[in-house]
């Protein structure tokens, strides 16, 4: 039975935040091309958004737009949100932080292409600080260890939507750009371990293996990705 339709391109970037969650909870979903809605029909759907991803919930016949809103909705539906008010708010904050990092790593959605000097300033200041923010959040809530031997989660004792979002952000980033893996291990070793453990979960691992076999190290596509690859490396 089909529970959802996800409208996004055949690249991980923002789409994987939602796909990893749907895979984790074993939801029945269909991946649809973003062009089925964007841009011609984007203003014709209920609850329109500026761009994909769009998530269509079959049971309610409702569209959701904006990756953070989609994840928060799914988190409520499947009980993947923390119970305490503080950590519930931190889950939203974490997803919004992820979205901010995506905007920044693409140089504000490709408003300009990266130059070497601009990239290095971002990589060794803003990006490293973002990694440290996630690391401190996890450390403050019991996240321990590193790759292969860690324990705990970003916001407490059980897996939440915040963990899936964090893995979708940094796991995808370092797979697509292996040069950044050393940065993550230096500035956020516990987060690196968390990403590895989330990506190794039984419902998520086969999905990622199939996706990576099909798309290689593809990230966000187009001129934005080409600019990143020229700076970060192939």
Image (spheres, rainbow, N blue to C red):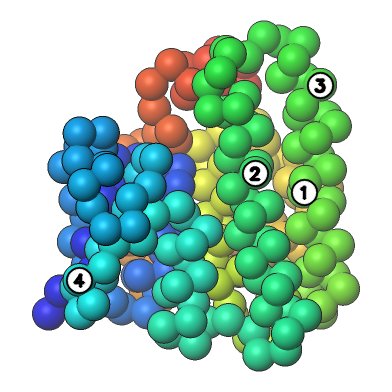
The reply to whether discs 4 and 2 touch (Cβ–Cβ < 8 Å) is: no
- Label whose residue precedes the other's in the sequence (4 or 2): 4
Q: Position of residue 102 (x, y in %)?
A: 58, 40
**First reached walking from the N terminus: tag 4 or tag 1:** 4
Q: Is residue 115 above or below residue 63?
A: above
Q: Position of residue 65 (x, y in %)?
A: 39, 54
Residue 131 badge: 1
SS at badge 4: loop
Nearer-N-terminus badge (3/2): 2
Of tags 2 and 1, the one toward the viewer is 2
Q: CA distance from mark 3 to mark 1?
A: 15 Å
**Residue on which disc 3 sits:** 121
Distance Cα–Cα, label 3 vs label 2? 17 Å
Report the mark closest to the observer, 3 or 2.
2
Q: Residue 27 in the image: state x and y as whole percent.
A: 28, 76
Q: What residue did someone put label 4 on? A: 61
Q: Could you say which is closer to the camera, residue 32 or residue 61?
A: 61
- Most foreground residue, 73 or 186: 73
């Amino acid at each position: 039975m089909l529970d959802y339709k996800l409208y996004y391109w055949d690249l991980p970037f923002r789409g994987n935040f939602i796909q990893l969650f749907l895979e984790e909870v074993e939801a029945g979903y269909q991946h649809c091309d973003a062009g089925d809605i964007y841009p011609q029909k984007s203003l014709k759907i209920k609850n329109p958004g500026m761009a994909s991803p769009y998530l269509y919930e079959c049971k309610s016949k409702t569209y959701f737009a904006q990756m953070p809103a989609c994840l928060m909705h799914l988190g409520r539906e499947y009980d993947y949100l923390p119970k305490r008010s503080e950590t519930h708010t931190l889950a939203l904050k974490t997803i919004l932080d992820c979205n901010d990092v995506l905007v920044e790593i693409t140089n504000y959605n490709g408003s300009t292409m990266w130059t070497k000097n601009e990239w290095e300033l971002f990589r060794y200041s803003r990006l490293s600080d973002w990694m440290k923010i996630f690391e401190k959040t996890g450390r403050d809530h019991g996240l321990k260890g590193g790759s292969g031997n860690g324990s705990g989660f970003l916001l407490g004792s059980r897996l939440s939507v915040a963990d899936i979002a964090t893995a979708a952000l940094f796991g995808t980033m370092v797979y697509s750009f292996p040069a950044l893996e050393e940065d993550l291990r230096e500035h956020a070793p516990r987060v690196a371990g968390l990403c590895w453990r989330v990506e190794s979960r039984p419902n998520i691992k086969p999905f990622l293996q199939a996706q990576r076999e099909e798309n290689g190290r593809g990230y966000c596509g187009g001129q934005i990705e080409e600019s990143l690859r020229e700076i970060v490396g192939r």
